[in-house]
Amino acid sequence: MMNPLDLLALSIVCYLLASLVALLGNKKEIPVYCSGVIGAIGGVVGVISAAFALAGSTPLMTTLASPFYFAKLTINMDELAAFMVMVISLIMVASSVYSLQYIKEYQGKGDWGICFFLNLFVASMVVLVVVDNAFYFIVFFEMMSLASYFLVLVDQNQKSVKAGLQYFFIAHAGSVLIMISFFMLYRASGSLSFSSFSHLALPSWEASVIFLLAFFGFGAKAGMITLHGWLPQAHPAAPSHASALMSGVMVKIGIFGIIKVGLVFLGGTHAWWGYVVLAFGAISSVLGVMYALAEHDIKRLLAYHTVENVGIILMGVGIALIGTATGHPVFAALGLLGALYHLLNHAVFKGLLFLGAGSIIYRTHTKDMEKMGGLGKLMPYTAIAFLIGTMAISALPPLNGFVSEWFIYQSLFGMSRQGDLSMTIAGPIGVVMLAITGALACMCFVKVYGICFSGAPRTQKTSEAKEVGWPMVVSCGFLALLCIILGVGSPWISPVISHIATMTLSATPIIVASGAALHPVSTTQAILSTPVIAIALIVLILVPVVILMAFKGHRLHDRSLGDPWSCGYAYEPRMSISASGFTQPLRFMFAPIYRIRVLLDPSGWMSRLLNVVTQGATRIEPVFDGYLVRPCCRGALALSRWISRMQGGDLRIYGLYIVIVLVVLLFVPFELGVK
Amino acid sequence: MTQLHMPDVNWIILAVVQALLMLLFVPLATGFSRVLRARMHSRRGPGLLQDYRDIVKLLRRQSVAPANAGMIFRIMPWVLIVTMLLVAMALPTLTQTSPFPISGDVITDIYLLAIFRFFFALAGIDSNSMFSGLGGARELTLGVLVEPIFVLSIFIMALVVGSTDLGYISQGMLTEIWQHPVTVILAGIACAFAVFVEMGKLPFDAAEAEQELQEGPVTEYSGSGLAMVKLGLGLKQLVVAQLFLAIFIPWGKAATLGLPALILAAVVLLIKLVVVFFLAGLVENSMARVRFLNTSRLTWSAFSFAGLALAFYIVGL
């Protein structure tokens, strides 16, 4: 068995190599292709490394030479870091393979640049999660933000430049907050290394300030509501396989940071932190999906769903914080288990959906869902993979999204049962929010799949679409398969993730699986067995088969013929439901929620703030002029006018001046000279 | 409470038999609703067994789909029946505990119902007809409005009993109702409302509308496909009604797995179901239809019942 750290280094070398190779690819195809292949190899090596790290029990730590005396370059691949490496690498494999064909869309339009920045972006994320020093963390965090900023700019049109700018600002506002919180920790510990940050005896207010700074800083990266404005702009602007990485993986770095600061460094000492995180999570999940519903740009819609899923993950993290602070390690561990599981699941199905959306765009050259339709028959493999993704994200059993949400439900249940008043109130509210989110997500993805893949093509261009090539189909298929494995295999995967969760919390291990069944620790509280559900669903197909066989009679084969019924009028293809028509009732009923979107978008009030500042500046400028500059000028003028009176032009007066000066000089030097 | 585990063979057989029996009695239940409606309209109407005749006749007919309809349109009836059978297996209807607790977790059940809704609505869009697409949108909108009520009322019951397993909730209710009477009653009212909607009854179902609103996603189905959809929809009515009965009216069930006890429990269950369908039919046929866009007002008031139930649970009543 190779050392996971060596493998990790190898995978990072692969990414760097891939980005260097891509640099050669200006106007050439082969280097870009090679770059994709090397990137995929890097991903596979990363997965293996993370798997070994999770399987082994020895702590993986090493210190490398650092050029800076104040910051040691320590690599610490603990369970959480290995888990994050796994998530990043899995999506990277799919994205790299996908890019082999997809990148042709950008041929001559900066394809080499995309490969260069994409590999750099992934490399910096991988290093970021394993590095154990605040200085290097921030360096790589910035590198990640910058690399992804260039990915957003790829299209080079006004929209993407604007999106990039907004992204750039919010990312940096976030990293400033993170830096401040790290500096406060540094002040207390006297060292920049992460290991010195934990177990600090901080005063309560200081710990809270550090937590809130880090929460909002990382929250901006995670795209939680109120700080999400950049996300639906930036993610759709990037190429689809880059969006998959940004939406599936990069936002998780924000979650990783919140877990790291809140639970690992500060030890989750205050329950109210947990309530804050839970509240932000719940609101993000409901509003995220609500806004997604109103979209008909497929990539923007998916980006809003990232806001939703980040909210669900944050709910789990919030529960973990509450449980840790109040001394309930069991539901805390369950909450974190749900959060981490959902983090992985979301990366997989959101990656799949973005790649699927990319396949559609690759063929139809539009992001507008109103122009799609009927792709289920034209692109059957993509359609099936996409359907699995939509079912997974809608949390339908036995797929993966359901399992992680089930754990979060169960941890909310565990929390509500503790008898503490605030927990008894917060738990059911969380459940209701999660239920609304589930129902809305279900509606939203029926819309996405239905409008894009079902029925008849809405435009001529769409009707000419055909199935994409094998790299794109294979990578979508790979992620779809992962959705099924992570769902049906949950009794065997959950213990691994629960181990990560309890190690992160430094709590006693919990037992969540027995045989093929899952329990939320308590074996009387609930039982879930996704493999049995999957088998039961398959076996029960026999029932309709038997019914159809028994009453076959002289029935003819099923037939597809003719137009849908249209009240006796001639049918037109336009007579099918549109994306905006589909959600009209809901938008009517929840109109106030759509109205507050304007209020919650920071770009609106930020630009208003900027206007106020510039207006104020223009107003203050004349004040300075009026009271400071102008009086000075006026005084100087008056003085000089007064002085100029001396210059009368009369020779006699000048003579007088000379006499006066001579007389004065006669006395003054005498005084000085004699002494 | 003993710990939840994989069911053994006897229980699985009971679960399958109970699910199949439910499927067998679907046309009877829907036929009963039709008879009731006819009586309330002062019509003679069809006989009690008319739906059996309809379904058998339809099953022998060819299924014709619109030319543009795809795979989803074809598999939807299958999905309906299969998911509802799985929920039906888990219901503690005759026995005090769930015969198949694997799918008997209330959260799992709610998401199994979501599969039903997902495919039902998706098939509506897939059939490419304006009416069925609209029907799908309405089905999902109702889902969004009703699901929070359904989940909250059931979750409160789970909290009262201390387990999210349907069987244990049902069993625990026998004793716990006296601990939290007000909570249980309020949650029951909210849940009854949600179940009424989930049963696809008026005014929340536009099935009887004029030409602008046909039977939602069912519009384009025909022949054997239509028969299967009808079975699936009917099965859902039976399942959600029994879900309600299992949680809120758990009395009169078999304590052991003996045949006499089971038969007695079946008789009690039949009576309960007749009452439920009678009441649902009564409400359905005596209500005027409201504009669809106004349903949210009604559901908010039902949600407030669930919210009140939560408040009383916190107070401890």
Image: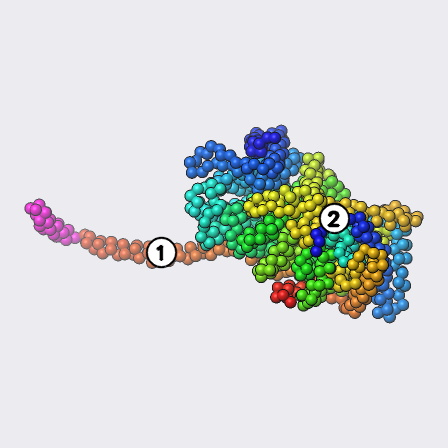
Residue found at x 67% / y 65%:
B179
Q: Nearer the viewer, residue B248 or A160?
A: B248
- Amino acid, disc 1: Asp
Q: Quadrant of residue A486?
A: top right
Residue B6 is tagged as: 2
Q: Position of residue A669 (x, y in %)?
A: 10, 47
Residue farthest left in this picture: A674
- Amino acid, disc 2: Met
Q: How many marks?
A: 2
Residue farthest bottom in this picture: B42
Q: Secondary structure at mark 1?
A: helix
**Crowdedness of circle 2 by 10 Å Cα count: few (<14), some, many (20+)?**
some
Q: Secondary structure at mark 2?
A: loop
Q: Position of residue B98 (x, y in %)?
A: 76, 55
Q: Position of residue A660 (x, y in %)?
A: 11, 52
Q: Which residues are magenta?
A: A650-675
Q: Nearer the viewer, residue A451 or A61?
A: A61
Kindly report which numbered mark, 1 or 2, lies closer to the viewer in this rendering. Answer: 2
Q: Chain of mark 1?
A: A
| Circles 1 and 2: CB atoms closer than 8 Å | no
**Crowdedness of circle 1 by 10 Å Cα count: few (<14), some, many (20+)?**
few
Residue found at x 84% / y 69%:
B40
Q: Chain of mark 2?
A: B
Magenta segment's dominant SS is: helix
What is the CA distance from the residue labelled 1 to the residue labelled 2?
84 Å
Q: Badge 1 is on which residue?
A: A625
Residue found at x 65% / y 37%:
A94
